[in-house]
Image (cartoon, grey):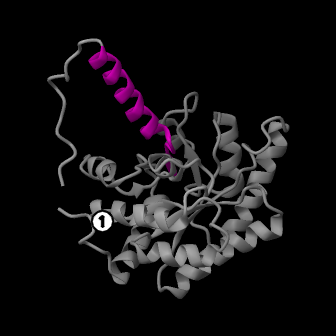
Amino acid sequence: MNAQTHPRTPTRVAVDAQALAQLYAAPEILRVVNVWDAASARVVAELPGTRAIATAGHSIAASHGYADGEQIPLDLMLASIGRIAAAAEHFPVTADLDGGYGDVSETVRRAIGVGVSGANIEDRMRPFGESVAIMRAAVRTGEQEGIAFALNARTDALVRNPERPRAEAIAEAIERGRAYRDEGATCIFVPGVLSEEDTLALVAGIGPQAVSVIGLPGALTAAAYEKLGVARISYGPMPQNVALTALKRLGESLHGDGVIPAETEQLNNF
């Protein structure tokens, strides 16, 4: 299959957005294994446990030779996301749109056009009012395009200043999260290694099935976060790091007279 031949219709994107919102609201935590190209999207889409596809902005940028943080041109990022959406044609797609690439309304509009029904958008700890306005603009753009865009509004309250007292950072994440929810965000993404205590505070402050977390080394398990009322767990650039680690180990083996493992699957067919 050519991943360019299956664009999603506006009606399909609208249905996908509703499906994403329902997945966030369900008691069962939504587990998304982040992907970075059509091949990784196809592999994840074929897993029995997959319910939605999430892109990793860092990983997409790295696959094209760019650093994280909107260094990759927006046109290239959106083209990559579109190919992912085409390859994972049976699932809703939520994209990592970084901080909105300068014009969040235009970025969301174009993302919807390539098949995206929800997205992470970072506040980057901009001034409070500016951050709220960015999240409001993302949601309103979805409405203008005829969909209930499933915004997973990201606050960097915990990761931008790791030396800050934890209680203060949690309190600000809650304040920002509530404000973003008031503007229509479906979920609030609070990256960082969250303890049970951190998670309980965030869920109590923002709401059950309204908090999104990242699974990093040292984090709780998805099942543990589910019991605490978390809506979604994603893994950011870690799946790509695991894949590249496997490639590195294979390369080391092959340079040392190794052979391709017999159990290797053919997963790059299109």
SS assignment for the magenta stretch, majority: helix
Residue interval drawn in magenta = 232-255
| Residue 268, placed above or below residue 181 | above
For badge 1, the amino acid type reads: Ala
User: Does the image show residue 22?
Assistant: no
State the residue at coordinates (72%, 43%).
Answer: 159
Left or right: where 46 falls relative to 239: left
| Residue 92, placed above or below residue 105 | above
User: Does the image show residue 162?
Assistant: yes
Query: Residue 30 in the image: x percent, y percent?
Result: 44, 51
Query: Residue 8 in the image: x percent, y percent?
Result: 32, 75
Number of labels in the image equals: 1
Left or right: where 7 falls relative to 235: left
Query: Residue 130 in the image: x percent, y percent?
Result: 79, 70
Residue at numbered disc 1: 86
State the residue at coordinates (68%, 57%).
Answer: 206
Query: Residue 204 in the image: x percent, y percent?
Result: 69, 51
| Residue 182, placed above or below residue 187 | below
Left or right: where 174 falls relative to 51: right
| Residue 102, placed above or below residue 267 | below
State the residue at coordinates (48%, 61%).
Answer: 95
Magenta span contains residue 245: yes
Q: Nearer the viewer, residue 49 or 255?
A: 255
Quadrant showing the C terminus: bottom left
Q: What element carries label 1?
A: helix
